[in-house]
Amino acid sequence: MARENNFKVELQTQPSSKILNQHETAPRHNSWSLNMLLRRLRATEGKKDDKFSNILDAVGEFAQKPYCNASWILAVGPNLSEAEQLNLTLPRAPNGSFLTCLMYLPVAWDLASIIQYGLNHTESCHDGWIYPETKQRSLINEFDLVCGKETSTETVQTMFMAGLLIGSLIFGFISDRLGRYPTILLSLLGLIVFGFGTAFVNSFHQYLFFRFAVSQALVGYSISSTSLATEWLVGDHRAHAIILEHCFFTVGVMFLTGLAYSLPHWRMLFLLGGAPVFSFIFYIWILPESPRWLMMKGKVEEAKQVLCYAAGVNKKTIPLSLLDKLQLPGKKMDKASVLDFYNNRHLRKVTLVMGCVWFTVGYSYFTLSFKLKDFGVNIYFRQVIPSIMEVPARLCCIFLLEQMGRKWSLIATLFQGTMMCLLILIIPSELKSALVLMVVFGEFSMAASVTVFFIYTAELLPTVLRATGLGLVSLAWAAGAISSLVLISQNLTLLPVFLCLTSAILALSLCSLLPETQDQPLSDSLESYPLQFRNTGEDTMSDDTLYDDAAEEVVKNTILNASVMKLDTDILPSSSQPTEADRKDD
């Protein structure tokens, strides 16, 4: 670009005809252009006898950079070939290639005068650009992102990450205030409007805005769906559901990569890639609200209705003895806010630790992902290869969580990722194949860490602030990703990986401060939150304390675990008729 700007100055400082229509003074100023044109025409004629040159033309030359659209000359010379048109209207750089950002100033001459005297005055392109031998319609040739309008991939990715950062705060708060069900619907609406609607944008700035908005909807759906699955399911079913959700997300990335590779137009990519979201409109009728969230909002009857609906879908009947226990304590309902992350000592400690670990996971994951670019790996392979590895990585989490629990599974996956970062620093740069392999296995480990930590975080947080807490740690994750983008854009070789190693070691040490959540009941209120992770062998809570301070947690865990605790022995033949066992108890 600097060379092109220097040549632009050179062209603009060349002597030019003061009166363009006085042809008698033009030859003295334009003899160089006319001679160059004659030499090119002779060379063209000479190539006709060079058969080998004709074969090379058929094979194809190096890709020509985009050049100004100078179709104005067709008005005076409609029969000009493309080569003649370019030679007459576009200036050349010292290496003989056409300049990308300059064209000769159009004149009101006839074709013979233009050929005879040539053109000297240049100006910036004002009728767009021509992109030779471009088979696919991309953002660059759609919005002419050349000549000072260039944008890097990091810019688009930063806008996407900024949307994740802002959306994690907004949708986490909305989910805890309005509920999981309306937040999921709102997120799906955002995916439809801004995801599918990206195909209809009219400028690159609109494209960036739509990417910013769709990333907010994406993180909103992720937070709300994880909260809903955590609060509906129990035991291993909860972990399995979240793991499968992450696996389907990875498969979706592979599907989009295949579409991007095969489709010739970027708008078709967003049309076909965004169309499946419309199939989730049926969520309006079948998606239930979280009964735990309803209880925390004092909506006991609605909580009973959704539980009975779920039991009916499973062809079960909830015993009346359990439904009767689903009552709120006499004290005033707990009012939680985002300030409790600071005021509650235990919640503050856990959130800070989780935020640091989430920052590390986000930074390390994206650093390893962008590292593949340094090894010259094709952009499509940079998406497909890690995605193929991530599916088994996430499925392996099922075995890890069952055998090692949440805490040690996270430590194991982080440790493996740490070792991969260490090997990347040790292995010589000449062994590119080995480095690529280490990067891929590092992404394998970090993908497993993301899934484990998502499950772990959702179980660590209380129901009243679960979505807000997930939003805060997702903010830390997005901040780590943006930090990775900033460092990678500086073209630093070893520093990003070294920071990845040190941050992973820090995360490993912080994980030891977190309590285990496997086989522990979920916490719903802030009062019961510090007691949730005490030693289960210590009888620290009496019946009165349970009903006074954590009645919501006990009764709802009783309801939600009924399917696991021999529900069939307590089933009533009818919700209005007692069983023989109840009559004997009476």
Image: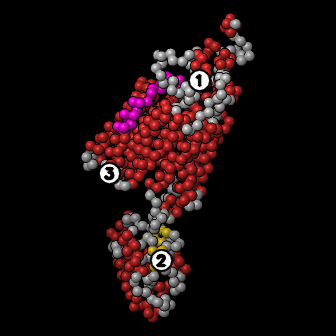
Q: Please report the residue visible at 52 percent of the width from the left and 86 percent of the height from the top.
A: 109
Counting residues from the N terminus, which is met first, the one under dot 3 or under dot 1?
A: 3
Marks 3 and 2 sit apart, C-alpha to C-alpha, by 40 Å
Label at residue 493: 3
Label 2 sits on a secondary structure element that is strand
- Point out residue 399 in the picture as x, y percentages from the top left corner: 43, 27
In the picture of the structure, the residue carrying the numbered disc 2 is 123
- Point out residue 452 in the picture as x, y percentages from the top left corner: 45, 33
Counting residues from the N terminus, which is met first, the one under dot 2 or under dot 1?
A: 2
Labels 3, 1: front one = 1
Counting residues from the N terminus, which is met first, the one under dot 3 or under dot 2?
A: 2
Amino acid carrying mark 2 in the image: Glu
Q: Please report the residue visible at 42 percent of the width from the left and 38 percent of the height from the top.
A: 357
Label 1: few (<14), some (14–19) or many (≥20) C-alpha neighbours in 10 Å: some
- The residue lying furthest to the right in this view is 576
Depth order, front residue of 376/296: 296
Magenta segment, which residues? 504-524
Mark 3–mark 2 contact, CB under 8 Å?
Answer: no
Residue 240 against residue 211 in the figure, above or below? above
Q: Quadrant of the C terminus?
A: top right
Magenta-span inclusion, residue 520? yes
Amino acid carrying mark 1 in the image: Asp
Label 3 sits on a secondary structure element that is loop
- Point out residue 354 in the picture as x, y percentages from the top left corner: 45, 36
